[in-house]
Amino acid sequence: MRSLQRVMRWWVMIGVAALVSCLFHPDITSSGPLWQGTLEPDVQVGGMAERQTWLLEFPQYWSTQGRCEVRGTSSTLLVQYGDRLTGTMPWIWDGEHTRASFDGELENGRISLELVPPNQQGFEISYQGRKAGVNEFSGQAKAGGICRRRSGEFRLTQLPSPRKPVKMPAVALLQKPFEQEFLMTNYFDHDTPRQFVDANGYVVNWQGDRLSVGSPGAGIDGHAGYDWGTPEGTPLLAVADGVVKFAGEGDEFFCPPLDQMTTGLYVYLEHETETGDRYETEYIHLSRIDVRSGERVTAGQVIGLSGNTGCSTGPHLHFGVRRFVGRSEKILVDPYGWSREGVDPWSRDAEGMESVWLWKPGQAPVLHEYGRQS
Ligand SMILES: [Zn+2]
């Protein structure tokens, strides 16, 4: 009887709004294992790092009480090293945020991929397909477990990595804050990055596009950094050599989206360029911190795990950058710079300044807005 109840209470949901793909089962508690792998080095082919990013759009399976439906499409990003494709995406198991992994191969015009949830009880999806265009694959997704009778089409499209526009000033300081790539949920707002204060109704991104609040990439007016939909437990990496200025729980403040006082786990790092300029990077909403104030860190070192602490409505990383203009005064900047002709609107603000491109070659995280139609 007990096991029958369990079967009757299956809830499976993939690719739900607000970033998450979810799997609920009220009877089983498992947050899944946290990070167990090692960080893969770039595969070097002829001196070039062969690393590509792909957008996977796949059927959203939805199942409750033994019935399964396919409802719309969900997306995630995958990274290719050599022939291997990997990725992780947010996943909820019995109310616990965790993550599911993709693993597959891209070879001879064919793709073979599997989604393995953190708790492999009766649910997995395989994707088999072929080349459908220059930078595109398509095929059939097949689910196991209770969704096994449903299948649907998936599409895999190669995404360009952001590159520094030729004329933009640059300082090659930062590398990726995580190993994989994730859908981006909020840009840095060049028209006053004052979160919860700015209320002009739009976000101006580094390319000078004016996005009305609520459209993809513009969830928060005045957003003061970048948000990526990193699932709970994603290892976060020091973007450059530096010193930990703060690691721990921040002061309490009022969080409008949650309508309550909140605090969270943060890490602030300070870095110095070869020419003596200083920058501070901030990592917000962590679930675990692995460094201490005052400690030296090296680029690529794991400083903690991403999470959903503080003023946050779903697991993600908020990443922000400030440039020092005096001994202790510092000003928010956009690490992607400003690529539109004309003056960066943020530099006209009394408290603002011109941004420069801060990424090392090939190290800028991909910017593909969550919810964007490809
Ligand atoms: Zn944010």
Image (tube, grey):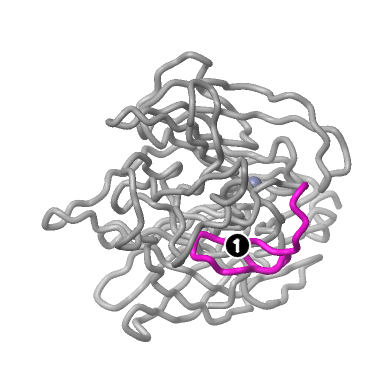
Q: Is residue 251 above or below residue 165?
A: above
* Relative to 325, 123 lies left or right: right
Q: Is residue 236 above or below residue 197?
A: above
Q: Quadrant of residue 318?
A: top right
Q: Residue at x 82, y 61 (%)?
A: 8
Q: Is residue 118 visible to the viewer in this orientation of the structure?
A: no
* Relative to 75, 323 lies left or right: left
Q: Is residue 356 visible to the viewer in this orientation of the structure?
A: yes
Pinpoint residue 250: horizontal percent, then vertical percent.
Answer: 69, 25
- 176 within the magenta span: no
Q: Nearer the viewer, residue 157 or 323?
A: 323
Q: Residue at x 77, y 47 (%)?
A: 197
Circle 1 — which element? strand
Please provide the residue range marked out in magenta. Answer: 197-216
Pinpoint residue 330: horizontal percent, then vertical percent.
Answer: 54, 31
Q: Is residue 249 above or below residue 358?
A: above
User: In the orientation shown, which residue stands out farthest toward the bottom?
Assistant: 132
Magenta span: predominant SS is loop
Residue under label 1: 204
Q: Residue at x 37, y 42 (%)?
A: 175
